[in-house]
Image (spheres, rainbow, N blue to C red):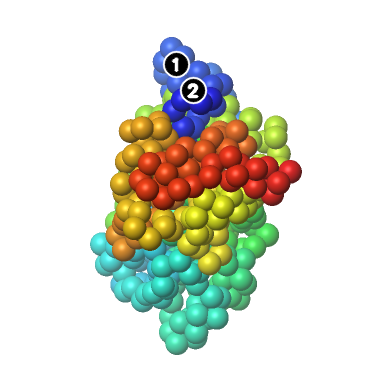
């Protein structure tokens, strides 16, 4: 593996060969029994990853399209909503909500920290008319996990308030039992733990959320799930189907479910814990107060510009990690542990980061970090 390209970002992720092969097959039309069968199986199997009995909808869009779908399908102009901002993707939720004329209240959390359920409770108490609470399960820009189960306990008590969860960088790596916890709308994206290229978003609605769908008055066309539902019942999608993505998804779901969702989750918990501890050995401090198993955010040592490190790792060591966004630019690198990534990839990542740090004048001991990783992971 010593010079093979390593993609260690929180989306896109490495794609297993069996899934990649699906994208190389000759095209078929989407209005065929072959495709209809594939769609049916995928729609059924994806529910197991969402841990829901409800229908899951596919949109041919990136994850952000799924975020827009959550909003336009459930809400009406002027509705009051509460948006938790723990980083850049929380900001995106608030921007979409504002673009559609919603009345937005924010809970702004210091980057690196997660929201507390009490803060959501206080905001809901202060305004009884809040129709939806928006929150990231994992805020990918900082690497924190938010307490979705605790927040769901609050929204479950209110028949007129939905919990809308952006689980794009969490689902498949973090346990998020949608039905059991009472999450009302959950959104996923193909290029994260589903091990596909970007281009497919997935979204499910609880029964409570579907009542909102029936009453929603925001303008919608492309993301209209009522029309999508009719099409799905007839074995089709409302627009042309992304045939290759659905083929890839069917294969990826086979792999995930064959391994077992719980085993998958445990694997990434162990890998990320090992990565964090081994990172400390290299002089990299973990930034997130409650770190997500899908992405680890490391503060780079004083005097090391993380953008320089990132670029150097890419050009000299054939390793892509992410830098920081906005206020974290230059200060952190973010390493993804999701998709087709295992111990060998994490070990190799540690070795290359150590070399990169050393090249930039901060002496780091790669083999010592790998030893630490193996201790923690075994
Ligand atoms: C990746 C990601 C998104 C979606 O981004 P797209 O580029 O639109 O796919 C949204 N939210 C979170 C938390 C993400 O990690």
Name the quadrant containing residue 371: top right
- Tag 2's secondary structure? helix
Find numbered disc 1 in the image and state the secondary structure of the residue it sits on: loop
Question: Left or right: where does residue 185 sit relative to residue 108?
Answer: right
Residue 43 % position (x, y)? 56, 37
Examine the rendered structure and indicate whether residue 33 appears above or below residue 144: above
Q: Which residue is identified by label 1? A: 24
Residue closest to the eye, 290 or 85? 290
Foreground of the two, 352 or 378: 352
Quadrant including the C terminus: top right
The residue wearing badge 2 is 20
C-alpha gap between disc 2 and disc 1: 7 Å
Q: Mark 1 Cα within 10 Å, few/some/many (few <14, many 20+)?
A: few
**Residue 202 percent location from the top left of the image:** 48, 44
Residue at 55% from the left image edge and 81% from the top image edge:
118
Q: Which x, y percent locates residue 196?
A: 47, 33
- The numbered mark at residue 186 is none
**Residue in the picture at 49% in, 55% down:** 284
């Amino acid at each position: 593996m010593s010079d093979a390209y390593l993609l260690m970002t929180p989306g896109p992720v490495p794609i297993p060969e069996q899934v990649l092969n699906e994208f190389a097959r000759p095209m078929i039309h989407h209005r065929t029994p072959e495709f209809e069968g594939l769609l049916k199986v995928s729609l059924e199997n994806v529910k197991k990853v969402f841990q829901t009995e409800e229908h899951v909808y596919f949109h041919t869009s990136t994850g952000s399209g799924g975020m827009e779908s959550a909003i336009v399908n459930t809400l009406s102009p002027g509705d009051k909503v509460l948006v938790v901002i723990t980083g850049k993707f929380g900001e995106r939720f608030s921007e979409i909500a504002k673009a559609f004329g919603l009345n937005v209240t924010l809970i702004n959390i210091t980057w690196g920290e997660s929201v507390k359920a009490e803060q959501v409770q206080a905001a809901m108490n202060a305004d009884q008319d809040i129709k939806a609470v928006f929150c990231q399960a994992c805020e990918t820009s900082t690497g924190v996990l938010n307490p979705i189960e605790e927040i769901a306990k609050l929204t479950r008590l209110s028949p007129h308030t939905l919990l809308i969860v952006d689980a794009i960088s969490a689902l498949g790596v973090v346990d998020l039992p949608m039905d059991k916890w009472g999450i009302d709308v959950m959104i996923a994206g193909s290029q994260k733990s589903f091990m596909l290229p970007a281009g497919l978003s997935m979204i499910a609605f609880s029964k409570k959320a579907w009542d909102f769908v029936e009453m929603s008055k925001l303008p919608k066309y492309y993301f209209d799930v009522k029309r999508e539902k009719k099409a799905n019942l007839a074995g089709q999608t409302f627009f042309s189907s992304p045939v290759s993505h659905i083929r890839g998804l069917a294969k990826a779901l086979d792999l995930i479910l064959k391994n077992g969702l719980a085993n998958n989750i445990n694997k990434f918990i162990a890998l990320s814990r090992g990565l964090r501890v081994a990172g400390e050995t290299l002089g990299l401090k973990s930034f997130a107060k409650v770190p997500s198993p899908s992405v680890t955010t490391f503060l780079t040592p004083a005097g090391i510009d993380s953008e320089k490190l990132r670029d150097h790792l890419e050009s000299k060591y054939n390793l892509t990690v992410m830098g920081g966004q906005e206020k974290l630019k230059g200060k952190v690198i973010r390493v993804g542990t999701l998709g087709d990534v295992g111990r060998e990839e994490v070990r190799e990542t540690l070795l290359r980061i150590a070399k990169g740090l050393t090249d930039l004048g901060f002496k780091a001991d790669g083999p010592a970090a790998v030893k630490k990783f193996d201790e923690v992971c075994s």
